[in-house]
Amino acid sequence: MRANLSIAIMAVLVSFPSWAHPAAQTASDRAAAVESGQKAAIAALNFQQGDAAGFNRARDNFTPDGWKDFMRHMDGYLDQKGAPTFTSSFVAKRDAAVLSEREGVLRLRIPGTLTQSNKIGRTTYRRAAIEVNVLRDSSGEKPIKIQHLEQITCLGSSTACE
């Protein structure tokens, strides 16, 4: 009798629509976080030489530590006013792949083509990728923030840019 009652209660709970809704919301929230993270990462790598304001607009998409880390990689490539000394363009080949998710941080890889140029010349990396860690707000009230952004270029048979 007790087993039948337990089975009946479980059947009611599982079939109740509001119990199923959070799982669907989580998948939807995750997809939105991936899309937002991809958009922010690509925006950070698309800037014009000499445009400090345009370059610094990306700052709002980073955590404070994430921006400091990104700026360390730009050390030596900014002029006295904080403007980039080169132009950068990243074009994604396809949507971001989720490499991992832990404690509200999504690790994404976005394969694409990276082009960097200045007055002297231009280099295009046809096999490139962005690896980005984005901080996901579980409440959905705060925007996605980049914790870490890394540019990867691949040679030979490397699969890191796939």
Image: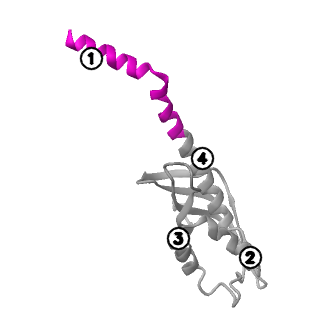
Q: Residue at x 53, y 45 (%)?
A: 30
Q: Is residue 12 magenta?
A: yes
Q: What residue span does the magenta drawing correspond to? A: 1-27
Residue topped by disc 2: 53
The correct choice, above or below, for 115 with respect to 75 in the image is above
Left or right of 32: which side holds 91? right
- Contact flag, marks 4 and 2 (Cβ < 8 Å): no
**Distance of mark 4 from mark 2, alpha carbons?**
27 Å
Residue topped by disc 4: 32
Task: Look at label 4 and name its amino acid.
Answer: Ala
**Distance of mark 1 from mark 4, alpha carbons?**
37 Å
Q: Nearer the observer, disc 1 or disc 2?
A: 1
Assign the N terminus to one quadrant of the image. top left
The dot on residue 66 is 3
- Examine the residues drawn in magenta and state their main secondary structure: helix
Secondary structure of residue under mark 2:
helix
**Distance of mark 3 from mark 4, alpha carbons?**
20 Å
Q: Earlier in the sequence, mark 3 or mark 4?
A: 4
Residue 74 occupies quadrant: bottom right
